[in-house]
Image (cartoon, rainbow, N blue to C red):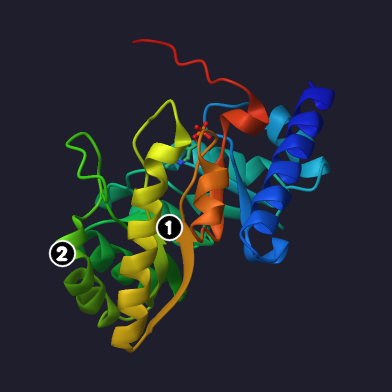
């Protein structure tokens, strides 16, 4: 197992480097988030020992359990759909919430952040491909959502996130990544107070190289590091 994760990380790292070179970007502009959902802490430790410090989880309960067991210098990323009643458990534990797609959710984050005396960094999740099955705000509503959230205390909008469609050929997602980048640039030009657009979270195992070429600063890789996930059906 140790060899598998270390080997996978080397492969991913080589791919990141190559994609950065192809697109004239610095390697430091792209941060790899190891998406460890469903995987046991033993595997997370192996990734940690191999140098990973950014981990992504999509369930609050699982994130908290792993947070308790893993070293404290890890930066935890909440990348999954977040229910308002669970916000209070994670506001002081995560470095970034990638999946904010409504004002009501942002208001709850702001409220809990005030209570815990922290400032929470968030990304706005945008459904650029307009997939019915996906969370995320529609492109047309993105700017007004960012403007509304920027008024809330103890919360800072740091950028945008999208989950591209599942495709066989990653080139099919290039236009969605380019579109997210365009929305990002549009928002920068609006100079909204308390919004500092720095991060574009896009690209997963199947398409992170294309995402890097289109400007991703955060890529979320699970399968490519930890192997296929096994979901038990209930
Ligand atoms: C699971 C997940 C990933 C990682 O997916 P892989 O295809 O295994 O790399 C990335 N982003 C989000 C939001 C996820 O839920």
Residue 161 - label: none
Q: Is residue 145 left or right of residue 155?
A: left
How packed mark 1 is, by other alpha carbons closer than 10 Å (few <14, some 14-19, many 20 or more), is many
Give the Cα separation between the discs numbered 1 and 2. 19 Å
| Residue 152 drawn above or below residue 210 | below
| Residue 64 drawn above or below residue 37 | below
| Residue 178 drawn above or below residue 230 | below
CB of mark 1 near ligand 1 (< 8 Å): no
Dividing the picture into quadrants, the one containing residue 8 is top right
Measuring from the top left, give residue 154's x and y in whole percent: 38, 78
At mark 2, the secondary structure is helix
Q: Is residue 40 left or right of residue 213?
A: right
- Residue at the image position 82 percent from the left and 42 percent from the top: 50
User: In which quadrant of the rendered image does the N terminus lie?
Assistant: top right
1 or 2: tag closer to the N-terminus? 1
Q: Nearer the viewer, residue 148 or 160?
A: 160
| Residue 155 drawn above or below residue 40 | below
How packed mark 2 is, by other alpha carbons closer than 10 Å (few <14, some 14-19, many 20 or more), is few
Q: Is residue 46 left or right of residue 138?
A: right
Task: Kindly indicate whether the residue at mark 2 contacts the one at mark 1 (C-beta within 8 angstroms).
Answer: no
At mark 1, the secondary structure is strand
User: In which quadrant of the rendered image does the C terminus lie?
Assistant: top left
CB of mark 2 near ligand 1 (< 8 Å): no
- Residue at the image position 21 percent from the left and 59 percent from the top: 139
Measuring from the top left, give residue 228's x and y in whole percent: 57, 20
Q: Nearer the viewer, residue 156 or 138?
A: 138
- Residue at the image position 75 percent from the left and 35 percent from the top: 11
Residue picked out by circle 2: 141
Residue picked out by circle 1: 97
């Amino acid at each position: 197992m140790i060899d598998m994760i270390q080997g996978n990380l080397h492969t991913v790292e080589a791919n990141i480097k190559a994609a950065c070179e192809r697109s004239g970007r610095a390697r430091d502009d792209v941060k790899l988030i190891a998406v460890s959902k469903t995987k046991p802490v033993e595997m997370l430790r192996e990734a940690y020992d191999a140098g990973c410090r950014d981990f992504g989880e999509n369930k609050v309960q699982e994130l908290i359990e792993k947070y308790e067991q893993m070293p404290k210098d890890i930066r935890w990323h909440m990348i999954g759909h977040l229910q308002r009643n669970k916000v209070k458990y994670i506001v002081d534990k995560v470095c970034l919430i990638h999946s904010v797609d409504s004002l009501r959710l942002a208001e709850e984050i702001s409220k809990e952040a005030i209570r815990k005396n922290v400032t929470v960094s968030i990304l706005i999740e945008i459904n650029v491909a307009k997939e019915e099955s996906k969370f995320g705000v529609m492109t047309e509503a993105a700017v007004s959502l960012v403007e509304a959230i920027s008024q809330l205390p103890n919360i800072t909008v740091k950028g945008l996130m999208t989950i591209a469609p599942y495709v066989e050929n990653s080139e099919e997602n290039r236009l969605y990544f380019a579109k997210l980048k365009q929305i990002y640039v549009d928002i920068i030009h609006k100079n909204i107070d308390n919004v500092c657009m720095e991060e574009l979270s896009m690209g997963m195992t199947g398409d992170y190289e294309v995402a890097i070429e289109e400007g991703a600063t955060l890529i979320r890789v699970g399968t490519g590091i930890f192997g296929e996930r096994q979901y038990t059906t209930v």
